[in-house]
Image (cartoon, rainbow, N blue to C red):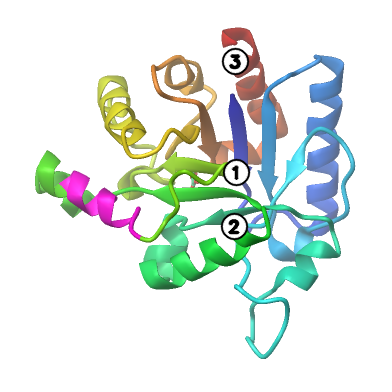
Amino acid sequence: MIIAANLKTNLTRKQTEIYVNELEDYVSKHTISQEVLVFPAASSLNPHAGKVIIGAQNAYATHNGAFTGEIGLDHLEEFSIKTILIGHSERRHVLGETQEALVKKFNFYKDLGFKIVYCVGEPLEMREAGKETMMEYISSQYEGIDTSYENLIIAYEPVWAIGTGLIPTLENIEEIHTDLKEKSIAPLLYGGSVKVTNAKEVLALRNVDGILVGSAALYSEHFCSMIQYAEDLN
Ligand code: PGA
């Protein structure tokens, strides 16, 4: 399974280093065979050797250039980063990234062979509009994306469940994951208010290949417990 931590705009470089080392210690001490990914803030990236894979939360589709506020491939290569998160709801809905911009980014990093965690998920009004409308909306987030890309991981994250403590029912997660698996056989993670208290049940669902965790992952002990749940289930 794939257990991923999105640290968002949290943890300084020093804090991230301590955090990643704690995870690394846990993973080696408990001979964890799950894939553990961590996405620190851009300014907290560091070279890292070990089992924990460090990825970027975002990068522009460029090697370098005049794109104020962005980082490019050169910056990722400095830290040997080969994994990137694309399409997170905060990038889509708070920072206004369009599907077209995401596709450009996707193709650029795909051509470089990056492991891509690509996020999809509906806002509350789409869910409330009924299943058909909701699935159409989610389908539109697959447009232009090579769903058979070998290094693709998809994360289903309902926007209304991110950082809110709200989560779909287990039956509902399983149903949507089963539908989404028809679009791509890529590993499919669930994300949105996954906590140490519900991670075990979510991980046990059919067609859930892992989790993408935000706030609850900020505590390394909690995140390590979730890694352990995945290991025990496997
Ligand atoms: P959350 O965030 O776990 O805090 O809900 C998940 C995410 O944004 O990936």
Label 2 sits on residue:
110
Residue at numbered disc 1: 151
Residue 69 in view of the camera:
yes
* Stretch of the chain drawn in magenta: 134-143
Q: Earlier in the sequence, mark 3 or mark 2?
A: 2
Image vertical order of residue 151 relative to residue 198, above or below:
below
Q: Nearer the viewer, mark 1 or mark 3?
A: 1
Element under disc 1: loop
Q: In the rendered structure, find residue 229 and report the number of the disc placed on it.
A: 3
In the rendered structure, are the residues bearing label 3 and label 2 in contact, judged by CB atoms less than 8 Å apart? no
What amino acid type should be assigned to the residue bearing mark 3? Tyr
Q: Position of residue 106 (x, y in %)?
A: 52, 61
- Mark 2 and mark 1 lie on one chain; the one further toward the N terminus is 2
- For label 1, count other residues whose C-alpha is less than 10 Å away and answer few (under 14), some (14-19) or many (20+): some
| Residue appearing at x 28%, y 25% in the figure | 169
Residue type at tag 1: Asn
Q: Quadrant of the N terminus?
A: top right
Q: x, y percentage for residue 160?
A: 31, 47
Residue in front for this viewpoint, 151 or 29: 151
Q: CA distance from mark 3 to mark 2?
A: 31 Å
Main SS of residues in magenta? helix
Cα distance in 3D space between marks 1 and 3: 24 Å
Q: Nearer the viewer, residue 210 or 195?
A: 210
Q: Cα distance, mark 2 to mark 1?
A: 8 Å
Q: Is residue 65 positioned above or below 47 on the image?
A: below
Left or right placement of residue 148 versus residue 139 in this view:
right
Q: Which quarter of the figure has residue 184?
A: top left
Residue 187: where, in percent of width, then height? 50, 32
